[in-house]
């Protein structure tokens, strides 16, 4: 399972302009995989959601997918550019 592709699909599903989304993966250490989600400043609210509900939902889905496939723990950082 490609976690970057899944994350990109989920983020692009909640924004109005999918061209303003960038998702990259970094392997920080032996314990975690870090996925960096960069979105345009104008649509960051759509990705985070009210009280962080959408961001937490995306994190939960990605963590569950990683766990089901026997992968490392995943950290997802969402930021604007």
Image (spheres, rainbow, N blue to C red):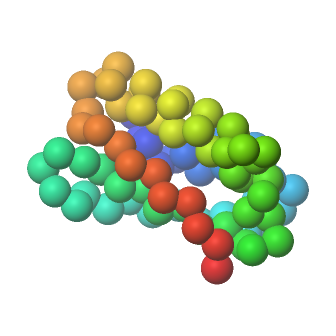
Indicate whether 21 appears above or below 81.
above
Is residue 71 shown to the viewer in this render? yes
Residue ranking furthest to the front: 51
Residue farthest to the top? 68
- Going 51% across and 31% down the picture, which residue do you hit? 60
The image position of residue 56, as x and y in percent, is: 59, 38
Residue placed furthest toward the bottom: 81
Give the quadrant of residue 72.
top left
Residue appearing at x 36%, y 31% in the figure: 66
Give the tally of numbered discs: 0
75 shown above or below 58: below
On screen, residue 34 versus residue 19, left or right, reads left
Quarter in which the N terminus is drawn: top left
The answer, for residue 9, to whether it is visible in the render is no
Looking at the rendering, which quadrant does residue 10 occupy? Answer: top right
Q: Position of residue 15 (x, y in %)?
A: 80, 53
Residue 21 image point, x, y percent:
66, 64
């Amino acid at each position: 399972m490609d976690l970057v592709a899944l994350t990109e699909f989920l983020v692009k599903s909640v924004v109005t302009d999918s061209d303003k989304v960038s998702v990259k993966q970094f392997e920080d250490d032996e314990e975690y995989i870090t996925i960096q989600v960069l979105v345009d400043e104008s649509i960051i609210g759509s990705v985070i959601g009210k009280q962080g509900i959408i961001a937490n939902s995306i994190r939960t889905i990605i963590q569950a997918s990683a766990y089901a496939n026997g992968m490392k723990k995943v950290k997802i950082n969402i930021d604007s550019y």
